[in-house]
Image: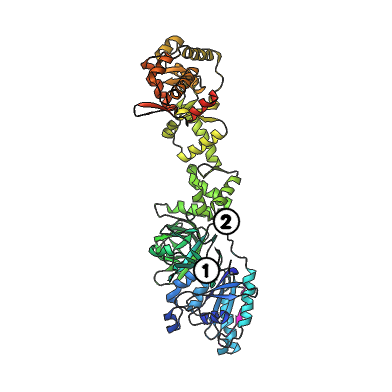
Amino acid sequence: MARAIHPIVVGTAGHIDHGKSSLVKALTGIDPDRLKEEKERGLTIDLGFARMRLADGRWLGLVDVPGHERFVRNMVAGCTGLDLAMLVVAADDGVMPQTVEHVDILDLLQVRGGLIVLTKIDMVDKALADMAEEEVRKLVRGTPLADAEVVRVSSVTGEGIPELRQKLEALALAVPPRASQGPFRMPIQRVFALEGIGTVVTGIPMSGAVQPGAEIEILPIGERVKVRGIHAYGGKVDEAVAGHSTALSVPEAKETGVHRGMVACAPGAFAAGDAVDVDLTLTKRSPQLGHREPIRFHVGTVEVRGQLLLLDRDAAAPGDAVVARVELDEDVCCAAGDRFLLRLQNPAMTCGGGKVIRLSKSGRYRRKDLGEELVGILVAGDRPEARIAHELQQAGPEGRPIDELSRALGLADEKVVALARGMPETALHERAMRAFLAAHVVAGEQELLQSVDKMLQKRAEAASVKRAAIRATKTLPQPLIDCVFDRLQAEGRVRMGRQGQALFLDRLKPLPAPQQQRFDRIVAECEQRGFRPPELAELEAVIGLKGDALLSLLDRAQDEGRIDKVGDHFYGATIVRTVLRAVRANCLAHAEVLDIPALRDQLDTSRKYLIPLLEYVDSLGLTVLRGGVRRLLPSSEVARDLAREAGA
């Protein structure tokens, strides 16, 4: 990496005109007010960014937010990804309305700590500064800033600035950096264009890392673009990682309509939706909120209008903690565990916030059932194993694809796969990359085997059924059927045969002596008849059995590979093998084209038997009918098997 960066971001908070931007400039030498209008009015309107050099040479990122009530939406967008906060309070004003709201926001977003900075101390005496400090101390009780140190400064005289810089650096170094594992995700804070570079998007990655040349997805629009270059803190870097402000050069995004509130992320790793299930806490200053209350929902850097759906009550009082669903007017991208804010639409004020439980699409639901389900997720807690078990319990016999579980838990696919493999209560269908509760797989296996028994009830000696018959007749979900089949095959209990037959080997138990004698007579009769095989009526006459009693033994003989049914006739297996050898040899002798008259003469059979036999050989893959002639398929499995047998 071209520049050494400490992956911690600090943000300002506080009332308008309390000196946040001046403080950032005093600490860094950088004026965070970048807009012409901001400089003309002396008012921070949008987010500002600066960097502070630490004693070890690394850079620390600072985000300056607007303090005016009209720009709270911008302030919240800047709080995405903040680790620490500097609550700025002017000593001559003390706590003001936006001081209160910003403290609520920092509390609801659960910043990991910070400092209280008492500014403009050059304008007041000590007694007034003491009063302001006492007032702000009272305000931050019960918040992440409750134990924050208070530093008194003047951005004009420079008093206290060195001490603030020292304390800020010590605090930043003491906070563990965000983990960079998992798929990349960055809520977009700014979008702009640079000459010769094109579109640039900035933000603070929430997880993962991305390098130049990698493809990213812009959600919720679903467009994919390539990262051409990465800058951070005034210089080029080799990758963008969670925990520091980043600018990605994405020229291809010019035509996509990308804007603040969207999310740049690893392709396919995250989803978008218009229904967010949440663990919500209302502030003590919030009014009572009713079911379907119109609200503004803030998550990441986006603000979307919507409705608050209460699930276990018709109204929520100030300070209440509830599970709820927020139905939005448009899709957003967020993940389980993200912090969010709710603001009223009228009057505009922060009324609550909390943690995202999951993101989904709006649709029909029962308030009570959904509420109980969300409580179950909360009870499962943050342990991913518990969350996986809960998600699979809710999914039922259908199970859940690994990529869906990954999105629900906010983890990489490989992490979820490793967890699922190690959990005794889960079963992973490796081929389909789908997880089930082990209990559902066990029950599914029992039900499937019972279904096979029922289908073969009148043919007790038989051991195979058409795979499609189970697919068509079972009430089990198809993903579970596929999982059970693969497991039975892996255990050697089921073998897939020709023409879609599934052979259940557990059913191939020794026959009673009388049945075994009849079975042997059937096989002998089919073998003895050679290339002029018997039909069903002829076997009935020879064996002395009819209906299901005879069909059951015929099925068993096919299951054991002793006879083959070709059209309406039954051939001994050795006879069919002889036919296959003859067909291959005939084709090889005639430039891989079958000479049918020569084959008929060799087998001493008639057209009545030969045509169905040739169609059967086609079905096995040895030959194919093209342009009125049959040609050998040397690459087919049966052809290769015959070649090995012949030593060719």
x%, y% of residue 293?
40, 64
Is 606 one of the magenta-colored residues?
no
The kind of residue on which mark 1 rests is: His
x%, y% of residue 191?
44, 69
Residue 39 found in image quarter: bottom left
Question: Which residue is farthest left?
Answer: 628
Distance in Å between CA atoms under marks 2 and 1: 34 Å
Q: Nearer the viewer, residue 471 or 24?
A: 24
x%, y% of residue 475?
44, 36
C-beta proximity under 8 Å, tags 2 and 1: no
**291 with respect to 184 (left or right):** left
Element class at badge 2: loop
- Write down the region rendered in magenta: 147-158
Specify the label residue 231 is tagged with: 1
Can residue 355 be seen from the camera position used here? no
Q: Nearer the viewer, residue 640 or 232?
A: 640
The kind of residue on which mark 2 rests is: Asp
* Residue bearing mark 2: 382
Judging from the image, the colouring scheme is rainbow
Specify the label residue 194 is tagged with: none
Q: Residues within 10 Å of mark 2 (few under 14, many from 20)?
A: few
Say which quadrant the N terminus sits in: bottom right
Which-is-in-front pick, marks 2 and 1? 1
